[in-house]
Image: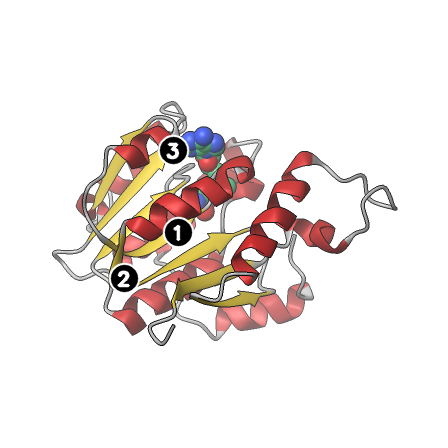
Amino acid sequence: MNFLDERILNYSIDKSSCPSKHCDDLELFTKENHPLHRMLCGKLEASLLKFLIHLSGAKSVLELGTFTGYSALSMAEALPIDGRVTTIDKNKKINEIASKFWKESKDGDKIRALFGDGLEVLETLDEEFDLIFIDADKRNYKAYFDKCLSLLSKSGFIVVDNVLWSGRVVEEIGKELEQDKSTEYLVEFNNYISSRDDLVKTLLPIRDGIYLIKRDSNA
Ligand SMILES: C[S@@+](CC[C@H](N)C(=O)[O-])C[C@H]1O[C@@H](n2cnc3c(N)ncnc32)[C@H](O)[C@@H]1O
């Protein structure tokens, strides 16, 4: 869900540095060919991810939830030549779309795709990441976060998508909107993050809610 009026969203996109035409083609292809295209992070969030990479000088990015490879390619475009995006997804089939578009992009060879259950694949990694983008199943958000924190470089940060879950996180359980399991996981996750004094965090009501989190170096 977008919390912004569509005209304001489009105006913001128009005034931002957005992913390339190649990413636009991938986004369009996904919209025309995949029933779950709403899972795409979209232009404005991709623009924010790119900006954060430029701002922080991140070189090593980890993503949980590749889908058709849109956010991975957007982030790869912002990385220096020796930068790398490692992206994990359990669904190898959708990844065929990602691979096709990545191969056609000059930035595609910065992307390494790993397949399997997110938590299991995370256990196999023993390197540090400057930016970690969590955008997979909501059930495992807390477990992903805890593991990802241990893989973060000293000045690294974590971006977590969909934390407002179309606004359901503020609905009272049993009232108006039927609370689904994912809402419960997200409410728990958001409470967990906000309760931790060792973290600096800001929750942005952009698109479906984006949590930016890093260790508090003063704590
Ligand atoms: C919201 S989509 C990712 C969208 C992508 N980041 C983008 O913006 O283009 C979520 C992805 O998480 C993957 N996923 C769900 N559960 C998973 C799990 N347990 N392990 C790994 N990937 C998982 C799904 O297959 C899906 O492709």
Q: Is residue 55 left or right of residue 200?
A: left
Nearer to me, 104 or 64? 64
**Precedes in sequence: disc 1 or disc 3:** 3
Q: Looking at the image, is mark 2 or mark 3 nearer the viewer?
A: 3
Q: Is residue 68 left or right of residue 6?
A: left
Nearer to me, 109 or 7? 109
Q: Is residue 89 above or below residue 41?
A: above
Q: How far apart are the alpha carbons under marks 1 and 3? A: 12 Å
Nearer to me, 197 or 202? 197
**Precedes in sequence: disc 2 or disc 3:** 2
Q: Position of residue 94 (x, y in %)?
A: 41, 28
Q: Looking at the image, is mark 1 or mark 2 nearer the viewer?
A: 1
> CB atoms at circles 2 and 3 under 8 Å apart?
no
Q: Position of residue 121 (x, y in %)?
A: 30, 31
Residue drawn at x 72%, y 49% is: 168
- The residue indicated by pointer 2 is 78
Q: Label 1's element? A: strand
Q: Quadrant of residue 190?
A: bottom right
Cβ of disc 3 within 8 Å of ligand 1?
yes
Residue 22 seen from this side: no
- The residue indicated by pointer 1 is 133
What amino acid is found at the position of numbered circle 3 in the picture? Answer: Gly
Q: Residues within 10 Å of mark 1 (few under 14, many from 20)?
A: many
Q: Quadrant of residue 203?
A: bottom right
- The residue indicated by pointer 3 is 118
Cβ of disc 1 within 8 Å of ligand 1?
yes
Q: How far apart are the alpha carbons under marks 2 and 3? A: 24 Å
Q: Position of residue 112 (x, y in %)?
A: 22, 39
| Extreme residue in the left direction | 82
Q: Label 2's element? A: helix
The quadrant the C terminus occupies is bottom left
